[in-house]
Image: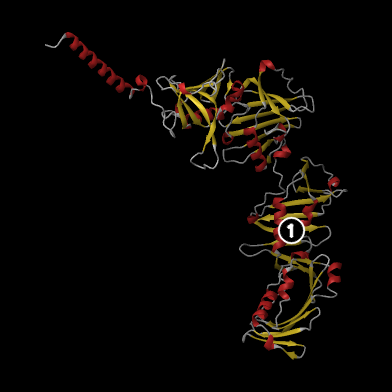
């Protein structure tokens, strides 16, 4: 018969095993009873940590404690101040906790805790969920003496830091943990307080109101996809790049340091001439977030004190000038002229059907087109293809030129001060919808260039170099092709080069046959037909760089031309029959001082310039030696 003692012992063992089984069923493991095993090398130290559940971050360093709570409007500091937490810092702390892995580990009793940085000033981090349950609890020491190479882009070593887990049931090990968030936690956690006065989503912003010593302006947009416009004091288009800069800089704008309102005496609103106010309104909001900036009266001051409406107990010390690595007040475009569209025009080139160019010294130039046909220009009452280079330069100038400044938005009746009472240049653009845009350009007595749209009262100042980009003489608009040369019709080419005997070529296109003569000597046997064909191709494709009127430099150069051509070709009637012959003489010369290449056709009085490579093409050796 079994003794009572044995029976009781068996019962106790059975109960203990049942309790253990129940514990494992409830907890999923026996870590709290036996201790969680250490995280292995290369694995996460907090494998069960879910960043999405993090709702409270509590920090402690010595006697200083800080608590941060996640709210519907972002992370907020509860202590030691009531203020907004920098959301980037919260992300960094949570991200470190979720991602840090074991680079090395050692039992706690085998390491000098003081040397590892776990003294009274070490940082303790406790992260909980909404219910108050612990998600991660640990202490950070100093940086370890070694670094690790990340798997991705492992060419740059990364720091490791001593980390001591503090969760209950966790075995006592010290880890060399990857990553380093110590810089965030220094100076009693002051860097965790959001130094940015504005916390907003630029994509959800509807209105910006700005008030400075130069006046007040309002920027707004109707919908999320609408362009920003200046609504007050005038209805004006904004410069997209300037608006992009403003929004980006407002997002990045932050203080050098923060103070509590009780510690600082704020100047009276508007007491300084440099007082500024910036107010933001989101879609769906009826209230503004207002930043008041109070620069010091000292012109050499480096910072300005400011307060923002949704953080009334915090004073921001903002950088005034661009001598920090931060966006300063002076970096913010806050005036109408900095934010308005500064381009001369916003023309849609594809919709333009006509252009008129008028000056006080030259005849009217008319350009027109009916797509897909090319642009045409009327010169001397004769319509011909327009010079594409001149057209490109004009359209580029009027669509890309920006105002140096806006002189006035309320131009008086007397425009003589800007030379606009008698414009030196008028440009008119006609769209396919028959809408017209006319711009007047004037020069003042000092040579400054000004522009004003017809029907507008705004005068803008332009760089005078703009005028150099607009061809205003009729001959400048002639097509770049030098002549209607066609190898089918060419029968004779005579080329004369300085210091060489003239070479005369006879050509029969149908038979593809060449003849060559030096004086009376037949040198056809020495002629390279491939090079002769190349020369004809160069003549066919001759295009001028620019057309010139009377030009003393060109005339002097062409008194002794480097090359001279006599090109004879058949004239063909409308039925394709030969109706005669015509010879064109072209002289080409090089200015040895400037390197410019000038030319002139004998049948016309216009000079022209040619690209530099033209001489080598037209002067190609044709005879085999």
Residue plotted at (66% across, 77% down): 534
Name the image quarter holding residue 25.
Answer: top left
Q: Which residue, given by chain and number where applicable, does mark 1 sit on?
A: 356
Quadrant (top left, top right, bottom left, bottom right) of the C terminus: bottom right
Q: Give the residue at the far right of this rendering.
A: 445
Residue 516 visible in rendering: yes
Q: Is residue 198 above or below residue 427?
A: above
Q: Badge 1: few (under 14), some or many (20 or more) residues near its Cα, within 10 Å?
A: some
Q: Nearer the viewer, residue 286 or 481?
A: 481
Residue plotted at (61% across, 41% down): 227
Residue 108 position within the rendered picture, expressed as x and y whole percent measured from the top left:
46, 22
Q: Nearer the viewer, residue 204 or 613?
A: 613
Residue plotted at (44% across, 19% down): 132
Residue 484 visible in rendering: no
Q: Give the residue at the far left of this rendering.
A: 1
Residue plotted at (65% across, 31% down): 253
Name the image quarter holding residue 200.
Answer: top right
Check disc 1 and report its element: helix, strand or loop. Answer: strand
Q: Give the residue at the far front of this rendering.
A: 110
Name the image quarter holding residue 490.
Answer: bottom right
507 left or right of 81? right
Residue 307 position within the rendered picture, expressed as x and y whole percent measured from the top left:
67, 23
Residue 566 position within the rendered picture, expressed as x and y whole percent measured from the top left:
76, 81
């Amino acid at each position: 018969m079994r003794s009572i003692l044995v029976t009781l012992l068996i019962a106790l063992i059975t109960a203990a095993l049942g309790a253990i089984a129940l514990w494992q069923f409830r907890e999923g493991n026996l870590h709290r009873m036996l201790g969680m095993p250490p995280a292995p090398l290369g694995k996460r130290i907090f494998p069960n940590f879910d960043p999405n559940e993090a709702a409270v971050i509590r920090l402690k360093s010595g006697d200083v404690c800080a608590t941060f709570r996640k709210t519907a409007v972002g992370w907020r500091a509860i202590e030691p101040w009531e203020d907004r937490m920098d959301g980037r810092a919260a992300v960094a702390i949570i991200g470190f906790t979720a991602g840090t892995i074991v680079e090395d580990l050692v039992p706690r009793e085998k390491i000098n805790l003081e040397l590892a940085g776990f003294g009274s000033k070490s940082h303790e981090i406790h992260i909980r969920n909404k219910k108050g349950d612990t998600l991660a609890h640990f202490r950070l020491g100093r940086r370890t003496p070694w670094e690790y190479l990340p798997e991705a882009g492992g060419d740059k070593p990364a720091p490791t830091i001593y980390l001591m887990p503090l969760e209950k049931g966790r075995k006592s090990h010290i880890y060399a943990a990857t990553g380093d968030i110590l810089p965030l936690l220094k100076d009693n956690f002051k860097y965790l307080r959001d130094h940015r006065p504005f916390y907003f989503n630029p994509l959800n912003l509807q209105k910006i109101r700005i008030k400075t010593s130069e006046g007040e302006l309002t920027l707004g947009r109707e919908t999320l996809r609408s362009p920003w416009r200046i609504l007050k004091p005038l209805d004006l288009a904004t410069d997209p790049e300037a608006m992009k800069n403003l929004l980006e800089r407002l997002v990045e704008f932050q203080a050098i340091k923060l103070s509590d309102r009780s510690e600082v005496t704020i100047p009276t609103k508007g007491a300084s001439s440099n007082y500024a106010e910036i107010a933001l309104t989101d879609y769906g909001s009826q209230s503004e977030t207002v930043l008041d900036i109070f620069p010091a009266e000292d012109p050499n001051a480096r910072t300005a004190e400011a307060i923002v409406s949704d953080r009334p107990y915090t004073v921001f010390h903002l950088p005034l000038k661009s001598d920090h690595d931060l966006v300063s007040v002076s970096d913010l475009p806050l005036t109408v002229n900095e934010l308005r569209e500064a381009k001369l025009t916003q023309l849609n080139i594809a919709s333009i059907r006509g252009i008129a160019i008028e000056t006080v010294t030259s005849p009217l130039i008319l350009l027109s087109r009916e797509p897909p046909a090319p642009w045409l220009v009327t010169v001397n009452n004769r319509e011909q293809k327009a010079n594409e280079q001149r057209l490109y330069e004009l359209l580029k100038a009027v669509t890309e030129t920006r105002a140096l400044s806006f002189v006035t938005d309320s131009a008086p009746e007397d425009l003589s001060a800007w030379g606009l009472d008698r414009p030196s240049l008028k440009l008119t653009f006609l769209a396919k919808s028959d809408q017209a845009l006319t711009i007047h350009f004037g020069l003042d007595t000092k040579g400054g260039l000004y522009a004003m749209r017809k029907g507008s009262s705004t005068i803008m100042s332009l760089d005078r170099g703009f005028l150099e980009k607009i061809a205003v003489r009729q001959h400048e608009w002639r097509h770049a092709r030098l002549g209607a040369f066609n190898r089918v019709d060419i029968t004779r080419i005579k080329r004369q080069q300085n210091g060489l005997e003239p070479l005369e070529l006879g050509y029969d296109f149908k038979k593809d046959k060449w003849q060559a003569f030096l004086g009376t000597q037949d040198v056809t046997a020495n002629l390279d037909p491939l090079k002769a064909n190349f020369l004809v191709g160069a003549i066919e494709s001759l295009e001028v760089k620019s057309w010139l009127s009377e030009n003393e430099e060109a005339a002097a150069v062409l008194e002794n031309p480097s090359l001279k051509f006599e090109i004879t070709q058949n004239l063909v009637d409308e039925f394709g029959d030969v109706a005669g012959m015509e010879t064109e003489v072209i002289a080409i010369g090089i200015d040895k001082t400037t390197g410019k290449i000038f030319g002139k056709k004998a049948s016309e009085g216009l000079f022209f310039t040619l690209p530099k490579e033209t001489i080598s093409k037209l002067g190609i050796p044709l005879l085999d030696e």
